[in-house]
Image (tube, rainbow, N blue to C red):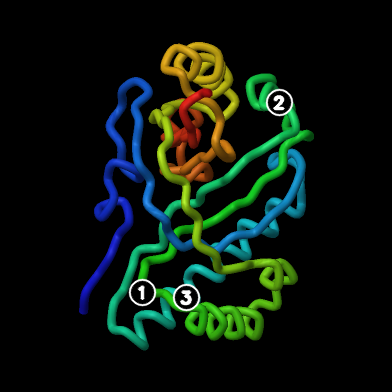
Amino acid sequence: MQSYDVKKALPGLYAPKPGDFHVVDVPEMAFLMLDGHGDPNTSEAYRDAIEALYTASYAVRAVAKAQVETVHTVGPLEGLWSADDPAAFRARDKAAWDWTMMIHQPDWITVEMVDEALATARKKKGLPALDLVRFERYDEGRSVQILHVGSYDDEAPTLERLHQEYMPTHGLDFNGRHHEVYLSDARKTEPAKLRTVLRQPVRPRG
């Protein structure tokens, strides 16, 4: 039986080495997604979204294993973040954040597989947020990213440098939502050792 792990298939995007900002070209990929708003530390909707995404992802994995005899490692949690003012991220004004949480799905996953998996998951767990999960492709394109090691709340200086120094110096402008890939399990990892990919889609300033 074949196996797949996105961290091994796309190491430059999902297992980058420590270093400074660097440009990457992100291919179009498929995700299970769920939208919300507000502080992820206090929002019940955020907790429900994460539970639903993992439940759905493991259900999809089971369906794919049975139908195409390929088993994949469930990918890391990812988040697209936005606010009316990008300064909300540098200021860590979490109440102002809109988020789309998501988990990558391999290319052979189909809409029919996802529909079957969601139906099975609803019967087993009955999580209301499962009804909000959608299967969608996301084309991020050229981006600037960096591996951040440390607490999520310590990201602000790095984002300040990205927005105020790196992007202006290299003639780049925002071209999509701030993207984070959570490579560590925050439940089991001390904050100082958390590994998070910080990624910003960009375009030439003009």
Q: Secondary structure at mark 1?
A: loop
> Label 1, on which residue?
108
On residue 88, the disc is 2
Kind of element beneath mark 2? helix
Q: Earlier in the sequence, mark 3 or mark 1?
A: 3
Q: Amino acid at mark 1?
A: Trp
Picture quadrant where residue 128 is located = bottom right
Q: Amino acid at mark 2?
A: Ala
The residue beneath circle 3 is 60
Going from N to C along the chain, the mark reached first, 2 or 3, is 3
Q: Residue 104's spot in the image, x, y percent?
A: 45, 59
Q: Residue at x 43, y 28 (%)?
A: 148
Single out the mark in the foreground, 2 or 3. Answer: 2
Looking at the image, residue 3 lies above or below residue 161: below
Residue 39, position in %: x, y? 74, 39
Q: Closer to us: mark 3 or mark 1?
A: 1
* Quarter of the figure that contains the N terminus: bottom left
Badge 3 amino acid: Val
Does dot 3 land on a helix, a strand or a loop? Answer: helix
Label tally: 3
Horizontally, is 84 left or right of 110 in the view?
A: right
Q: Is residue 204 above or below residue 108?
A: above
Question: Which of the marked residues, 1 or 2, is nearer the chain's N terminus?
Answer: 2
Q: Give the spatial CA distance, label 3 vs label 1.
A: 11 Å
Q: Nearer the viewer, residue 4 or 195?
A: 4
